[in-house]
Image (cartoon, grey):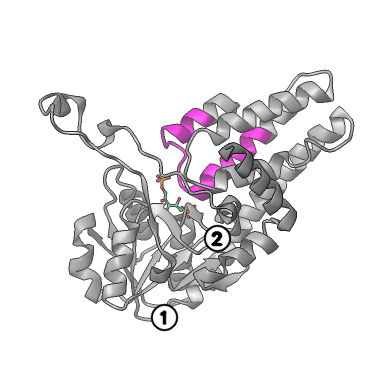
Amino acid sequence: MLITETAEKIKCMEIRGAGRIARSAAEALRDYAKTLRVNDVESFRRDMMEAAQQLIATRPTAVSLPNAVHIVIAGLEGSGTLVEIRNDVIKRANEFISSSRNAVKQIAHIGARHISDGDTILTHCNSEAALACIIEAHRSGKKISVFATEVRPRNQGLITIRTLNAAGIKTNFIVDSAVRSFIDEVDLVLVGADAVTVNGAVVNKIGTSQVAHSAAEARVNMLVAAETYKFAPRTIVGELITIEERPPQEVLSDKIRSTLPNVVVRNPAFDVTPAEYVDMIVTEVGAIPPQMAYVIIRDYLGWGIEEFHKSFEINTKHED
Ligand code: RUB
């Protein structure tokens, strides 16, 4: 798929969910690298960098997107011929795509071990990683049932209930505001993530923090399923995750809004759940307490102390 086409599909959410967004960006860069007609390394680098920027700019919250893009283009600055550099991008993209798929499978096995026979699980939004854990627990013979939220305004809950229904898992479909009413019937909350910060805060679909709050009040454990490439390296240097605010038309039509001149619709797509509300984050390399997020960033995303210093210098320069 061409870069612009992929970028448009990510923006309008035809391609959505942090893992899928990351893989489709890697695929787009790979296909672009294959077909890019240039005669020299410099032009190849320039065009690839532009494509990378275009993809990263589509949605600001899912850290999986810039992480995937950086993994794919990491070899661009190295030395080599045009053929070598082109092949390097293609190889890295293919490696990322297959390791991302494997990560979800691995998370499913690890996450399923944290689900007990007889559990009722509440999930919010539509997370491939969270659903993989639930489906794996069901597949391994555990009798489980699910509460799935509607997820206003884009109704991702519908995708979730279709998947659970197809897997033969008993599911209760509830409106977002009914979470607290049903939380006493729930044994475990399990959601995905768009980003995990260095201090273990989880950024996920708007409403997740309310779910987490209800779970904490009712002493229900909260698990987050997140591949390591959803951890946000730049939060080490204090960078905040940008919360995407989407168009008001997703919430209220222009026709209705035009009759309400004093009303402003706010439509943030994500919110932040502090680490204290999260019991465990299930990654492909193991289930960790949120306080261990730094270890993932350092050991699995390769953000050593040099990167930290480089970024710190850049940040300080910006402040001057
Ligand atoms: C999707 C969302 C999902 C995470 C994790 O939001 O919040 O919970 O992206 O999903 P949107 P996955 O629908 O706005 O993209 O586990 O599939 O990566």
* Mark 1: C-beta under 8 Å from nearest atom of ligand 1: no
Boundaries of the magenta span: 7-29
Instruction: Tell whether position 8 is magenta.
Output: yes
Secondary structure beneath dot 2 equals: loop
Of residues 266 and 114, the one nearer the viewer is 266
Q: From the viewer's perspective, tell me whether residue 170 is left or right of residue 72.
A: left
Of residues 115 and 75, the one nearer the viewer is 75
Secondary structure beneath dot 1 equals: loop
* Place of residue 136 in the rendered image (x, y in percent of width and height, measured from the top left): 48, 68
Q: Residues within 10 Å of mark 1 (few under 14, many from 20)?
A: some
Q: Tell me the residue that label 1 is attached to.
A: 116
The kind of secondary structure the magenta stretch mainly shows is: helix
Q: From the viewer's perspective, tell me whether residue 49 is left or right of residue 86.
A: left
- Give, as a three-letter code, the residue at label 1: Ser
Q: Residue at x 33, y 60 (%)?
A: 209
Instruction: Tell whether position 28 is magenta.
Output: yes
When asked about the image quadrant of residue 166, the answer is bottom left
Q: Residues within 10 Å of mark 2 (few under 14, many from 20)?
A: many
Q: Residue furthest left?
A: 259
Tag of residue 198:
2
Earlier-in-chain disc, 1 versus 2: 1
**What's the distance in space between the residues labelled 1 and 2, CA to CA?**
29 Å
Q: How many marks?
A: 2
* Place of residue 195 in the rendered image (x, y in percent of width and height, measured from the top left): 50, 53
When asked about the image quadrant of residue 88, the answer is top right
Of residues 223 and 245, the one nearer the viewer is 245
